[in-house]
Image (cartoon, rainbow, N blue to C red):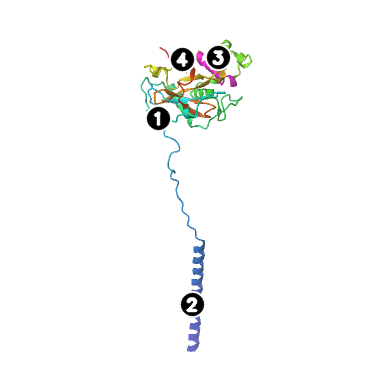
């Protein structure tokens, strides 16, 4: 009887050992399989994960700025073929945010801010017609769009204002240059010739001669002023319009915010002394006591 118990116990011990051996072999096999399949991967956070995507902040350059000497700007309209690539100037972080002179009015500040915002937008040069809206509804603009859209966003619907003025004063807007007798609202406010005529009649007209030695130049050339350049005296459609910028070159000459076929987008370019200025206006005209 005892012999049977011992044999039974022996067989049970052997079964336990086999079970342990099998479990150990399976575990070893799994470990070897994991090692064979293991591949180290390292994940890194982007270095600029918490950095800003834009230079900060554009609006602080002018909100409380007093003007005197100005900054960068320039270029373009309908069919212009002028300018050099190296004339485009990137804003200098070291240029002052304040300029000596009289304070800008609230509307001047607003116009300058809106014009500066265009520098960061994906706008390219080209001509399209927008029968429904009149104003460009795509990112394809000409130089007059920079002026009209900026003023519209500041509360001045240039499309309506120019159409009204053209309809009431046809003698001031020679339609024969377009081969018709009546204005077209959604087209004519973007025509540089008609836009210039409107500002001649409704804005404060200022000097077209920039004198770097004039002690009053900061009063005569203020941020947000509208300027037009002439490139072909026989073809007014070649004129280019833009805004005086609050930034300026190393000599203190204002830059101009414009778009052109040469530069392809809205930029600030140093061209105020290089190109012929044929129009310089302040709109809306300041109140005169």
Query: Is label 2 in contact with label 4 (beta carbons under 8 Å)?
Result: no
| Sooner in the amino-acid sequence: mark 1 or mark 2 | 2
Q: Main secondary structure of the magenta part?
A: helix
The 10 Å Cα crowd at callout 2, few under 14, some 14 to 19, many 20 or more, is few
Residue hosting label 1:
60
- Residue 62, picture quadrant: top left
| Sooner in the amino-acid sequence: mark 1 or mark 3 | 1
The label on residue 89 is none
Query: How many angstroms separate mark 3 from mark 2 (CA)?
Result: 106 Å
The label on residue 165 is 3
Residue hosting label 2:
17
Left or right position of 60 against 23:
left
Q: Which dot, 2 or 4, sits closer to the camera?
A: 4
Magenta range is: 186-200
Q: Quick check: is 98 in the magenta stretch? A: no
Q: Secondary structure at mark 4?
A: strand
Between 177 and 159, the residue placed more toward the observer is: 177
Residue 88: x and y in percent read 47, 29
Query: How many angstroms separate mark 1 from mark 2 (CA)?
Result: 81 Å
Between 207 and 20, the residue placed more toward the observer is: 207
């Amino acid at each position: 009887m005892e012999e049977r118990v011992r044999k039974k116990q022996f067989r049970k011990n052997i079964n336990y050992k086999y079970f342990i051996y099998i479990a150990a072999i399976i575990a070893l096999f799994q470990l070897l399989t994991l090692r064979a399949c293991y591949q180290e991967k390292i994940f890194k956070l982007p270095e600029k994960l918490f950095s800003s995507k834009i230079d900060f902040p554009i609006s602080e350059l002018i909100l409380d700025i007093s003007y005197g000497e100005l900054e960068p700007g320039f270029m373009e309209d309908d069919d212009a073929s002028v300018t050099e690539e190296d004339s485009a100037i990137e804003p200098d972080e070291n240029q002052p945010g304040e300029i000596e002179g009289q304070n800008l009015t609230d509307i001047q500040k607003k116009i300058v801010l809106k014009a500066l915002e265009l520098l960061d937008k994906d706008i390219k040069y080209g001509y399209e017609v927008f029968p429904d809206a009149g104003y460009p509804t795509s990112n394809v603009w000409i130089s007059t769009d920079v002026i009209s859209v900026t003023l519209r966003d500041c509360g001045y619907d240039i499309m309506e204002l120019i159409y009204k003025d053209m309809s009431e004063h046809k003698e001031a807007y020679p339609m024969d240059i377009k081969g018709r007798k009546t204005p077209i609202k959604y087209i004519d406010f973007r025509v540089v010739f008609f836009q210039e005529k409107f500002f001649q009649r409704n804005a404060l007209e200022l000097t077209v001669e920039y004198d770097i030695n004039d002690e009053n130049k900061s009063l005569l050339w203020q941020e947000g002023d509208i300027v037009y350049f002439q490139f072909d005296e026989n073809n007014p459609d070649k004129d280019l319009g833009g805004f005086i910028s609050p930034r300026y070159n190393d000599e203190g000459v204002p830059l101009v915010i414009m778009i052109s076929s040469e530069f392809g987008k809205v930029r600030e370019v140093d061209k105020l002394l290089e190109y012929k200025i044929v129009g310089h206006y302040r709109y809306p005209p300041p109140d005169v006591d």
